[in-house]
Amino acid sequence: MKVIVNVAAIATCLTVFVVGHQHWKEKIEVHAAQSKTSVVMKQPVTAEEEAVDVMRYTKNLPPFFVKKIEQAIQANKPLSFVIAGPHATTEEGSWAVMVKQFIEETYGKEVFTVHIHSLTGETSANILAKSALSTLEQYEPDVVLYEPPTLLDNGLIGIHNTVKNTNEMMQQLKQLPSAPALLVQPSQPLAQASVYPNEVTLVKEVIDQHGVYYVDHWKTWPEGEALSAYVSVEGVLSEKGHAQWASFYKAFFKGV
């Protein structure tokens, strides 16, 4: 009887050992699989993968701009992008600052370095007299987004001079030593204006003659009385106006 009990005890111990060993083995396998997964998740993103991820945002950009971005990624050197004009300010909450922050956050500072060059209060005559556009070279720009001061010229120097000065400004921009790619945009629209839109159209014709890419953000602004909540009759941008201008470029640079 005692022998039978001992045998039963031994059999029970063996069963417990086998079951325990199997459970331990399964836990080890699960832990190993989880560790392997963790290692895979933590692997750094390659330059090629990062480039593919960034390039999906570029479908709204002109081909020459896309090529500049590709070259910046391949050279591992940030593209120097300058936003310049009379309404490009470095004040917090301005459309230019919001665009700068959005581009650098979306593409990364490894791809873009955005500079804001303000020409606040300067008419086209003043910009030429001061050779103000030559100062853009300090950024060694790869791409420049320029706003001619058509709104500031309005009612001051005459459309004939505005057109002539715009032609000269385009020549100066194209002659910058760094030979940047150029984009040109209009100033903000004005509610119930009659002369100003015609002036903007004439300036655009000069831009087109130079073969420079024109970015028309006017099509996204509200029209009529609704515009007065965004821009005053004097052309001053409200908080909503800055947000509206910035929203256009956020979509432009996000590919939506």
Image: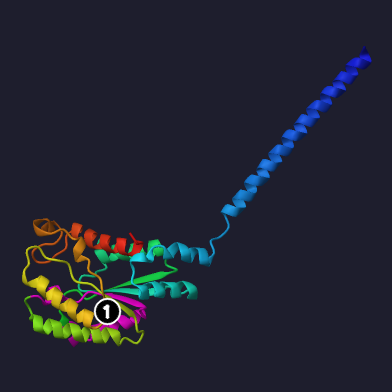
| Quarter occupied by residue 230 | bottom left
Residue 68, image x, y percentages: 40, 75
Residue 134, image x, y percentages: 28, 85
Q: Is residue 157 above or below residue 229?
A: below
Residue 92 is at least partly visible in this image: no
The quadrant in which the N terminus is found is: top right
* Towards the viewer: 146 or 211: 211
Q: Seen from this angle, which residue lies furthest top?
A: 1
* x 63%, y 45%: residue: 34
Number of marks in the rendered image: 1
Q: Is residue 130 above or below residue 20?
A: below
Which amino acid does the dot numbered 1 rest on?
Answer: Val
* x 27%, y 68%: residue: 90
| Quarter occupied by residue 128 | bottom left
Residue count near mark 1 (Cα–Cα under 10 Å), binned few <14, some 14–19, many ≥20: some
Residue 227, image x, y percentages: 13, 59
Helix or strand or loop: what does disc 1 sit on? loop
Q: Is residue 45 left or right of residue 195?
A: right
Q: Is residue 190 left or right of residue 20?
A: left
* Towards the viewer: 115 or 112: 112
The answer to if 39 sits in the magenta stretch is no
| Quarter occupied by residue 188 | bottom left
The quadrant in which the C terminus is found is: bottom left
* x 79%, y 31%: residue: 18
Q: Is residue 43 above or below residue 100?
A: above
Q: Is residue 22 above or below residue 136?
A: above
Q: Which residues are magenta?
A: 125-154
Residue 172, image x, y percentages: 26, 86
* x 7%, y 67%: residue: 193
The answer to if 149 sits in the magenta stretch is yes
Residue 32 is at least partly visible in this image: yes
Residue identified by numbered label 1: 212
